[in-house]
Image (cartoon, grey):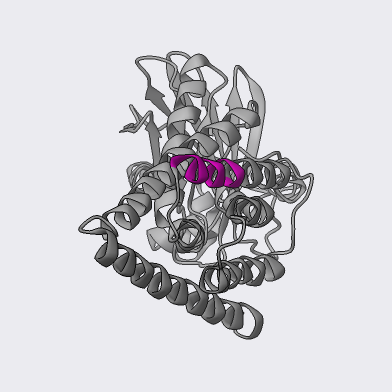
């Protein structure tokens, strides 16, 4: 998971430390999640204004009356129980019981706690919080503690209502590996840009050694680009990356159409442009919540998933090219050439469309 955000620290301090004044309403709440071996404890701090709105209490100050607040205990518990979802290793947890709401009158804050029993310390905890959906600007600061140490702070809102936390255990490491291998595989099989690039490189076919050289060069290059971007060593601007990737498709398609009987340089082409696709892969990796520790495991696991997916694509593309020339020597060569020319035109034209779109319509 990403490191603690300064913005989260500031907003959390404003809400919990300084409080919210009566004269101004700030659409903000907080949730502390403490992960222990036997249970998961949650403490929610929300503003009386927001709770009063969703409970139909008017004016909102009435909710700060001890009698009114006690009478709304069940309603408040049901509200947060429905809007805060916690899953441990894929299993949705249910709160045993919610505490009696407590209040801080001067700050106009309501505090309530819940306990979720655990059979074992989980590897992955998924937290979803849409506490006050009536206000699209509302944000919730989630603080995650493990062994009583603050591990991460995350801001959840309408654009990002959930995140994953991986515990610093063997189960957490196993969860990281599973999560990121699957994510890499999905990215490999769903990214049209690198799929077209790889297919374009393989359209002309070749010996087993040539195919392996192309795949090896592409793997080394994109892995280097992915690692550099993932660890912040080199992160190209997104506005330039998409057109550059599109240019790689144009180059491969045109090169296939112009190739003669000279030396096969497709491995060098794969190496030269592979890093661009690696930077693109890093963008997909960055969108996934990564563990606070062991970031390298997430990068390596994601790369393994990519490798599996790309190998499947390469085997499929190479098989199609080989089968297109199978029937007879004469007819097979003509068919193979037709497949290569048609495919190369499609790759080049697609790259041209994406290049124009990336330059003028982003």
Query: Residue 192: x, y in percent?
Result: 45, 63
Please state if 355 lies on the left or on the right of 200 as rendered. Answer: right
**Taking the image as drawn, is residue 50 in sight?**
yes
Q: Image quadrant for the N terminus?
A: top right
Please give the name of the residue rendered at 28% of the width and 59% of the height, measured from the top-left corner.
329
Q: Nearer the viewer, residue 169 or 70?
A: 169
Residue 211 on the magenta segment: yes
Query: Residue 115: x, y in percent?
Result: 42, 26
As drawn, 171 above or below 65: above
In the image as oriented, which residue stretches furthest toward the left? Answer: 327
Please give the name of the residue rendered at 45% of the width and 32% of the height, measured from the top-left corner.
125
Q: Nearer the viewer, residue 332 or 101?
A: 332
Please give the name of the residue rendered at 34% of the width and 33% of the height, measured from the top-left corner.
90
Q: Image quadrant for the C terminus?
A: bottom right
Please give the name of the residue rendered at 54% of the width and 38% of the height, measured from the top-left corner.
303
Badge count: 0
Location of residue 142 by image quarter = top right
Q: Nearer the viewer, residue 249 or 88?
A: 249
Residue 94 on the magenta segment: no
Location of residue 311 by image quarter = top left
Look at the image and give the residue range highlighted in magenta: 208-218
Query: Residue 225: x, y in percent?
Result: 68, 47
As drawn, 69 above or below 330: above
Query: Residue 103: x, y in percent?
Result: 56, 42
């Amino acid at each position: 998971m990403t490191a603690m955000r300064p913005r989260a620290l500031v907003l959390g301090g404003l809400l919990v430390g300084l409080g919210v004044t009566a004269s101004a309403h700030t659409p903000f709440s907080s949730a502390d999640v403490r992960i222990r071996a036997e249970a998961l404890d949650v403490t929610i701090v929300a503003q009386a204004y927001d709770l009063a709105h969703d409970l139909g209490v008017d004016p909102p100050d009435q909710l700060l009356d001890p009698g009114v607040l006690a009478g709304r205990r069940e309603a408040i518990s049901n509200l947060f129980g429905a809007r805060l979802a916690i899953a441990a290793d894929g299993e949705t947890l249910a709160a045993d019981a919610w505490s009696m709401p407590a209040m801080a009158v001067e700050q106009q804050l309501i505090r309530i706690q819940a306990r979720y029993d655990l059979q074992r310390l989980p590897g992955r905890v998924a937290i979803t919080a849409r506490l006050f959906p009536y206000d699209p600007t509302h944000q919730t600061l989630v603080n995650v503690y493990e062994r009583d140490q603050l591990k991460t702070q995350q801001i959840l809102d309408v654009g990002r209502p959930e995140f994953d936390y991986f515990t610093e255990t063997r189960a957490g490491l196993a969860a990281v590996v599973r999560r990121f291998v699957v994510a890499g595989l999905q990215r490999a099989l769903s990214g049209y840009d690198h799929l077209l690039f790889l297919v374009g490189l393989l359209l002309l076919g070749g010996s087993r050694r040539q195919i392996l050289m192309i795949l090896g060069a592409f793997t080394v290059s994109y892995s280097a680009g992915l690692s550099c971007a993932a660890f912040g060593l080199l992160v190209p601007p997104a506005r330039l990356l998409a057109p550059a990737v599109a240019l790689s498709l144009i180059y491969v398609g045109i090169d296939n159409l112009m190739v003669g009987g000279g030396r096969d340089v497709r491995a060098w082409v794969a190496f030269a442009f592979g890093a661009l696709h690696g930077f693109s892969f890093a963008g997909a990796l960055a969108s996934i919540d990564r563990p606070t520790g062991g970031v390298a495991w997430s990068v390596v696991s994601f790369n393994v998933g990519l490798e599996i997916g790309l190998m499947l694509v390469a085997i499929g593309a190479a098989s199609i090219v080989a089968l297109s020339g199978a029937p007879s020597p004469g007819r097979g060569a003509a068919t193979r050439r037709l497949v290569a020319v048609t495919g190369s035109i499609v790759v080049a034209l697609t790259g041209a469309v994406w290049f124009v779109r990336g330059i003028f319509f982003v």
